Image: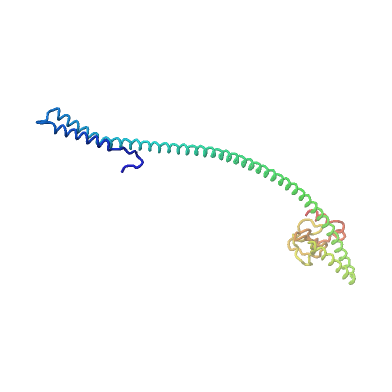
Amino acid sequence: MRDSTGPTLTKWPFFVGDALLLCAAYLIYSQTHGPLGLRELSLIALCIAAAASLGILPFILEYGGLVKVAEATALTTVVSQIQKLETIASDITTATGRWQFVQEAADKTATSAKEISDRMTSEAQAFADFLQKANDNEKGTLRLEVEKLRRAENEWLQVLVRMLDHVYAVHVGAVRSGEPNLIEQMRNFQNACRDAARRVGLAPFAAEPSEAFDAQRHQVLGGNGAPPPGSVVAETIATGYTFQSRMLRPALVRLQNGKAEAAPDLLAQGKSEGVIGNQ
């Protein structure tokens, strides 16, 4: 099917020329009387060949025009494609430039982030060192305060134990006096003092007569060496004390069949101080 946009060649002049050549060949044939000679045959053949050539010539020319038009169209398409490729290449170049810009920005951002991270790490380390130093200083201060509190606690425990020892000695003196009213008053006074001491964790205890000697809870005042096995307590010379369930001082006792080598007055002279000071 012929393209409507291609060139159109007028064919009737060629057809007219074709018809004239055929008519000329016929005239040559009709005007020759007798057998056709070589000259006549050559002219007739030449007219027929010229007519045939003239008949197909417009088609050949038209086909050539169509081919040229097709080539021009293809060339136009190629040029258009080349222009599109140039546009695409320009877009690729622009995109590459933008990508390079984005990559540079990303590199700068990564560098800034690394610097910020390093700075944060450094500041965190400095803050941790500061906290460690502050913690060490605070621990040292607390240690000193605890030592002061322990010394103060030991001092007031010594004072309180000495007071209770004096109260016990006075109570023992009242018992030895044989005065019932005095014994009752001193017993009440001693119980009140011991109740007050128990409120701060100081609990006095005494060994009962005929109680078995316990080296963990009892101590023989002025005794040399360990008592023999099976020893029995005769009386308590000075009460023992526990502070917050911790043994502070064993009870000072006299054993049966043993020699009393100390009196309660000796306790008032500060024997309890040496025992508490070793705690």
The residue sitting at the left extreme is 34
The relative height of residue 90 versus residue 217 in the rendered view (above or below) is: above
Q: Measured along the vertical axis of the image, is residue 230 above or below residue 118?
A: below
Residue 239, quarter of the rendered image? bottom right
x then y, percent, for residue 44: 17, 31
Look at the image and tell me in which quarter the C terminus lies.
bottom right
Residue at (22, 32) in percent of width and height: 50
At which x and y percent is residue 78? 40, 37
Please identify the residue farthest to the front as the structure is shown: 31
Instruction: Where is residue 238? Give x, y as percent.
Output: 82, 62
Residue 27 lies in quadrant:
top left
Q: In front: 76, or 126?
A: 76
In the rendered image, the quadrant that contains the N terminus is top left
In the picture shown, does residue 225 fall above or below 20? below
Q: Residue furthest bottom?
A: 180
What colour scheme governs how the chains and residues are painted in the rendered image of this protein? Answer: rainbow
Q: Quadrant of residue 49?
A: top left
Q: Left or right? Give the position of 103 relative to 228.
A: left
Q: Closer to the camera, 187 or 75?
A: 75
In front here: 107 or 37? 37
Q: Is residue 211 left or right of residue 177?
A: left
Counting every numbered tag in the picture gives 0
On screen, residue 143 versus residue 86, left or right, reads right
Residue 84 at x, y percent in the picture: 45, 39
**Above or below — where is 276 with respect to 99?**
below
